Structures are given as C-alpha cells and as structure tokens.
Amino acid sequence: MNSTTNQALNQQIHMELESSYLYLALSAYYDSKDLPGFAHWMREQSREEYGHAMRIFDFLLTRGAEVTLDALGKPAPEFGCPTKAFDQVLEHERSVTQAIHRLYEAAVAEGDHATSVELQWFIQEQVEEEKSAEDVAAQLRLGGSEPLGLLIIDRQLAERE
Ligand code: MG
C-alpha cells in the first residue's frame, strides 16, 4: 500500500475513534439530563464508531500495512441543550462523509482497487449515518422544544438496537 494512503487510513481510524469518544461523552451528557433513550442511542452510536475504526484497523493489518494510533482529543465539555447537543451528531457525520469521500478519491487516483472497494462500504454506511441523524434532528425540530416532545423522542430512541 502506498504510504500516503496508509497514513490517510490511519487518520480515518483516528477520526472514527474520536467519533466514538464524542458519542460516549454525549451519552453521559444525555444520561445526566434524565434522557435515557438518547443516552442509549449515543452509546450504541459510540459502539458503531468503534466498529468502524476496527474495520479499517483490520483492513490495514490484512494488507500488511502499518497501524499508527494517535492521541484522542478531549470531547467538548459543554453540549448546551438536548437539541443543540444532537446537532453535533449531524454536523460531525457530515464531516466524516467528506473525509471518506476524499479518501476514496485518493484511492481511486492511486489505482488502489482494494482500498477503493473497502471505502465503498463506508460511503454507503455514511448515507445511513446521515439519514438516522437527520431523522432524529427533524423530530427534535418538531417537538424538541417541549418537555413532552422530548420525552416522546426519548422513548423512541430507547428502542434502537
Ligand atoms: Mg463512522
């Protein structure tokens, strides 16, 4: 594997782990606000992001490429209100999508077919990630400013598997 691609994939592992860390912090935040459904949703999201990081980790090892782990940044100490906090998810997932698209374009330009195919899974996954974040953000726009609306959304998010 080309060293630029290898480095870029290591950066993507880092981005996925930071996503996992951000959602873990958000899970604790929602728990502290007595919204266990939101807390559960974020915890599941955090677990999924860890899975994304591990998928790239395993891909690098399988290809005989180098894995380099970097330090994780501290998540934001303050998330504002429950609706604002959720906006961070959508914003964050959009930036992850852009990063994956850039990675994919570089892999294609490099003629690294195996990495291109691996990244196609991530491109599709990001469509799902953005949709699920958008769905919750839309519900919050409708009912998130009222305590009852928040409680109804919280019940729904508790059902995430
Ligand atoms: Mg991810």
Image (cartoon, helix red, strand yellow):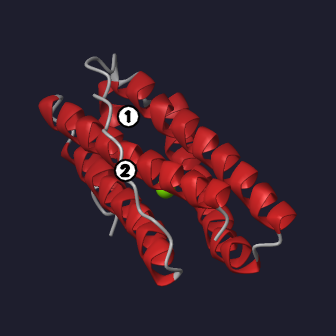
Q: Give the side of residue 117 with respect to residue 31, left or right.
A: right
Residue type for callout 2 = Leu
Image quarter of residue 5: bottom right
Judge whether 41 appears above or below 25 on screen. Answer: below
Q: Is residue 117 above or below residue 19?
A: below
Badge nearest the viewer, 1 or 2 = 2
Rendering coords of residue 128 (x, y %): 60, 62
Residue bearing mark 2: 17
- Residue plotted at (25% across, 19% down): 77
The C terminus - image quarter: bottom left
Residue at image position (43%, 77%) is 61
Q: Are marks 1 and 2 in contact (CB under 8 Å)?
A: no
Element under label 1? helix
Q: Position of residue 93 (x, y in %)?
A: 56, 44
- Would residue 50 be seen by someone viewing this image from the given angle? yes
Q: Quadrant of the N terminus?
A: bottom right
Residue 41 marker: none
Q: Is residue 129 visible?
A: no
Q: Does residue 76 appear to the left or right of 99 in the view shown?
A: left
Residue located beneath label 1 in the image: 149
Q: Nearer the viewer, residue 118 or 25?
A: 118
Tell me: is circle 2 under 8 Å from ligand 1: no
Distance from disc 1 to disc 2, alpha carbons, whole Å, reads 32 Å
Q: Inspect the image, locate mark 1, and give the three-letter code of the amino acid beneath it.
A: Gly
Residue 20: percent from left, percent from top:
34, 49
Q: With respect to residue 49, does 146 lie above or below?
A: above
